[in-house]
Amino acid sequence: MKNYTTIKDISNLSETIKGAILLKMNPFELSEIGKHKTLVMLFFNSSLRTRLSTEKAAKNLGMEVMILNVNDAWNLEFEDGTIMNIDKSEHIKEAAQVISQYADVIAVRAFPGLKDKARDESELILNSFKKYATVPIINMESATAHPLQALTDAITISELTEKKTPKVVLSWAPHPKALPQAVANSFVEMMQYLDVDFTITHPEGYELNTEITKDTTINYNQEEALKDADFVYVKNWSSYTDYGKILSEDKNWMMTKEKLGKAKFMHCLPVRRNVVVEDAVLDSNQSIVIQQANNRTYAAQVVLKQILENL
Ligand code: CP
């Protein structure tokens, strides 16, 4: 693997999932593969899981890890040809090449602004690192995608399914803040690759990018969509069509034990209790959110392994 910026960078998904499950059984099997190699992790935004699991994954492979909260460094300019006489001290052209002197792999987290759809969809920060860095780039959640989370979710469903073709439902939930579509986008793309019966349910107006959802079933009736589900993935996202807006805070979309039925409950975390999902779900043995969080390590580890093998 050259870079991991989208799930399309995975050349063989079933082998990658199997590889992650094998690494989970024996995490230190390849503890020499990353010897004398350094992962630099750059955070433009907050993180708990991605930061810790990716660091753990790299260390399991014997890598050194350096972390920079980019807001503590020089303010970066991303536009070409600007006169840098205001607040930006360093251009991405130098910064990405300089970081590449210290890194064998660079991982980047950079959320969207949710104000300007075209700008967010250009993935300016992620793509600038891809363009100017001289080492592989990993996406730790960008404006439109969270491929490490989606790989984690595929691993978790593969581990826990009792059926060849489980029914998986992505169910929108209310949230007081406008959140990105990145997790939902990558989850949808991942489900399109897996052998699952997949449905998305959300209020009207919350349609995701149709270039991503393609012909995936969308049902505006949550109760109907959830019928006989095996896995229910709950997530909020702000409107894509009325870009970045909160169109509904309808509490009826919160996931409850009654609505969940016999399904397993999934969420990428962090999650707001009794807003997105009620306590009774998270505190039940139907919730697999902690297994998901654990699998973040092995998703990152299998990706780093494949990148290291290609260096
Ligand atoms: N799911 C996820 O990416 O968590 P963090 O934002 O804490 O990294």
Image (spheres, grey):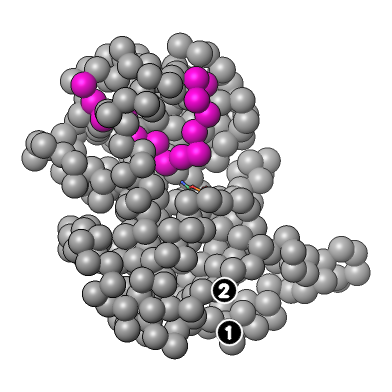
Disc 1 or disc 2, which is closer to the eye? 2
Looking at the image, residue 36 sits to the left or right of residue 308; the answer is right
Instruction: State the image coordinates of residue 268 (x, y, percent, origin top left).
Output: 42, 41
On residue 216, the disc is: none
Q: Tell me if I can see residue 89 in this picture.
A: yes
Q: Tell me the quarter of the picture where residue 195 sits.
A: top left
Q: Which of 270 and 121 lies nearest the eye of the viewer?
A: 270
Quadrant location of the C terminus?
A: bottom left
Residue picked out by circle 1: 102
Q: Residue at x 56, y 51 (%)?
A: 47
Instruction: State the image coordinates of residue 210 (x, y, percent, origin top left).
Output: 41, 38
Q: Residue at x 37, y 62 (%)?
A: 300
Q: Tell me if I can see residue 189 in this picture.
A: no
Residue 284 lies, with reference to residue 298, above or below; the image says above
Q: Tell me the quarter of the picture where residue 67 sits.
A: bottom right
Residue type, mark 1 in image: Tyr
- Dot placed on the residue nearer the N-terminal end, 1 or 2: 2
Instruction: State the image coordinates of residue 50 (x, y, percent, origin top left).
Output: 48, 55
On residue 66, the disc is: 2
